[in-house]
Every structure is written in structure tokens, then in C-alpha cells.
Amino acid sequence: GCGERSAVPRAASADPEDDAPLLPGEVGEGRIRIAGGASTLTRRDEAGKVILEARSGRSETEVSREGEPSTRAALRQVDGSVFRDGRKVSGFKAPAGRYLEEQKILALEGGVTLTSVEHGLTLRSDRLRWDEATRTFRAEGGVTLTGDRFVAGPTAVLVSSEDLRRFGSPDRFKPTR
């Protein structure tokens, strides 16, 4: 799959926390760090169909000076969607997140909400990871799952399909991809 990013320049904020670096550590040799305002990260499958779209109110990306793909991206005020066959199957929202290019993982944190479009389920957790290879979510920390007629949890860890149709503990859940 390929990733696309678009960034809109942002004005300096009156809140110093808003201008603090998002990515931890020093910038590696031969690399530059780009701070941006609102941005969108789009991932596509081999056929070119969108599989992930993550929008952020603020972002910071580290890239090589030679133009190699980013290996790290930090995001704030994140919301987005996961798609299957061109159709939105779930939506997510979180205060913060990171996209790990090499592992093809979106990691969200700070109190995450994931909602299934088709199945009327809502998952809440401290942290949530979406794995592009398996197209699964892994929720950790105070995980609850709410449906029309039930509330399950809290539990420490829950793994689910991208549409929340299938879910279970990590030792019992088997991805279909």
C-alpha cells in the first residue's frame, strides 16, 4: 500500500504546549522533522482502494533528506475511518496517535473511541492499535464494548476485526487475513 500526506501550514499558538515537539528524541542524522497543522494520512491497498484515513489537528513527521518515506509520524486530535472494499466499516477518535510506517500500524492513545458503522457497537479503551497487515484492532487498558442491549468490560485487552463483528481475547481471536 502507499501512504499520502497533506499538510496545511499552521500559525504559532499562544499555548506553549501546542508548539512542543510531538516526536520524542533527537532528529536522526540525515533526517529532518516537519511540523504541520491539520493533516490527513491515507493508506491504500494494492488495488489502490483506501483502507485507512486518519485526520489530525496537528502532526509532526520525520523524513530523510533524500526523500525516503517517513518512519515516524505523531498526530494530535485524531479522527478517522477504516474501509473495506471501498466502504467505511468503522470510525475512531483519540487525543493522540502515531503512525509507524515500517510496521504499518496506527497507534492511538489517551482515551480512544472506536465505532462500528454496520454493527452498532462502540469500543472504548486507553490505547488502540490498527494493524494494516491483519486488518485488526488491539485495544488495551480499561476496554469496554457497548451494544444496543449490553455493556461488556472493562477488560485489559481485546482484539477485534476492523468492523467489530468479531472480537475476543488475544489468545482466542484469530485474524481472517
Image (tube, rainbow, N blue to C red):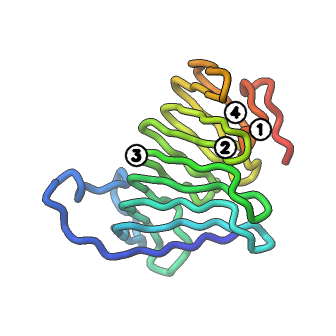
Going 37% across and 75% down the picture, which residue do you hit? 8
**Label 1 residue SS:** loop
Image quarter where the N terminus lies is bottom right
Q: Position of residue 43 (x, y in %)?
A: 64, 65
The residue at the point 56 percent across, 30 percent down is: 140
The picture places residue 149, in percent across and down from the top left corner, at 67, 23
Q: Amino acid at mark 4?
A: Val
Q: Residue furthest front?
A: 148
Of callouts 4 and 1, the N-terminal one = 4
Q: Are marks 2 and 1 in contact (CB under 8 Å)?
A: yes
The residues bearing labels 3 and 2 have C-alpha atoms spaced at a distance of 19 Å
What type is the residue that disc 1 sits on?
Arg
Which residue position is annotated with label 4? 159
Q: Is residue 114 above or below residue 34?
A: above
Q: Is residue 176 left or right of residue 9?
A: right
Give the CA separation, mark 2 to mark 1: 8 Å
Locate residue 131, reporting x and y percent.
67, 48
Element at label 2: strand
Specify few, some or many for label 4: CA neighbours under 10 Å numbering under 14, 14-19, or 20 or more: many
Q: Are marks 2 and 4 in contact (CB under 8 Å)?
A: no
Residue where numbered disc 2 is placed: 116
Instruction: Compare marks 4 and 3 and give the one earlier in the sequence.
Output: 3
Provide the residue designation for mark 3.
95
- In this rendering, the label closer to the viewer, 2 or 4: 2
| Residue with the mark numbered 1 | 165
Q: Reading the chain from its start, which is encountered first: label 2 or label 4?
A: 2
Is the Cβ of the residue at disc 4 closer than 8 Å to that at disc 3? no
Query: Which mark lies nearer to you, 4 or 1?
Result: 1
Query: In whole angstroms, how far apart are the C-alphas of marks 4 and 1?
Result: 11 Å
Q: Residue furthest right?
A: 176
Q: Quick one: label 1, few (<14), some, or many (20+) residues within 10 Å?
A: few
